[in-house]
Image (cartoon, rainbow, N blue to C red):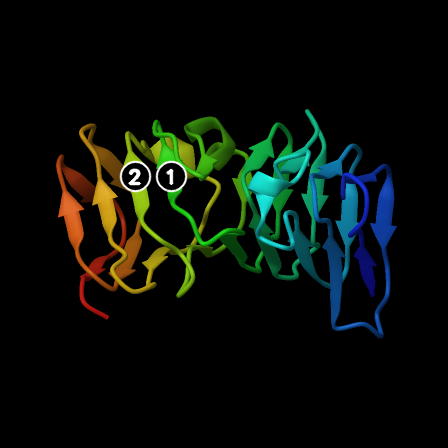
Amino acid sequence: LSLLTTGGSGDLELNETEISAEALATTTISATGDLKINENLLSNTLLDLISDNDGLNVGNTNDGDLIIALGKVVDTQGNNLNIKANDIDLLGSLNTGAASLNVLVSDEGDIGLGNTSHDLNLSKGELSRIFTTDLTVGDTTTADIFVNDIETADTENISGMIYLKALNDGSKVTFEETESVFKTLDVSTNNGIIVQSNLTTEIGDLKLEADL
């Protein structure tokens, strides 16, 4: 099942929506402009949410952001959730239960976590409203990832591993000036890991691979 916009502003707005399609392996909701989730979105399939689907946010009237309205939830009911967006404005929450969440930036730009500002940014508050098992941020299309001032409470609803992957040519991960604390963390990059402050895992492993 696919919902797609390409013309005009390219925006797509969803109100109360429940996707119940047991015969479908994946549901894709895609917009050239902003993708706005105004009410609860429930899905019993693997769910792909894509905004700025052409990766050309600079040329559009809108930025191509994924916007989850205040107090609303995207709930995949135990299925994986894949997000690709210019940026994420998470006023509500994301819930995959026992499944995983994967986050990519649409224009192959930078990603920031915590008190930092980059192309796609997940603030401390936004991270705290993510309920998932494993969180993967980035892949082979991602430029640099920046992390600053992550506290245990910010990721307490992520029960498994957090993976940071900056695997594009020349990409790296930088832990900026304020200490970051995770439960568990796995970092892999193409071109180095820069640690400018204390980096700690409180429960599980800390794995760093800097030349993949």
118 or 100: nearer the viewer: 118
Q: Decide if residue 183 is in sight here.
A: no
In the rendered image, residue 58, in percent from the top left (x then y), is placed at: 56, 40
Residue 51, above or below 127: below
Q: Residues within 10 Å of mark 2 (few under 14, many from 20)?
A: many
Amino acid type, label 2: Val
Disc 1 marks which residue? 112
**Which residue sits at x=80%, y=55%?**
4
Label 1 with label 2: CB-CB less than 8 Å: yes
Q: How many marks?
A: 2
In the rendered image, residue 44, in percent from the top left (x then y), is placed at: 77, 60
Relative to 83, 201 lies left or right: left
Quarter of the figure with residue 57: top right
**Secondary structure beneath label 1:** strand
**Secondary structure beneath label 2:** strand
Disc 2 marks which residue? 147
In the rendered image, residue 90, in percent from the top left (x then y), is placed at: 59, 33
Quarter of the figure with residue 45: bottom right
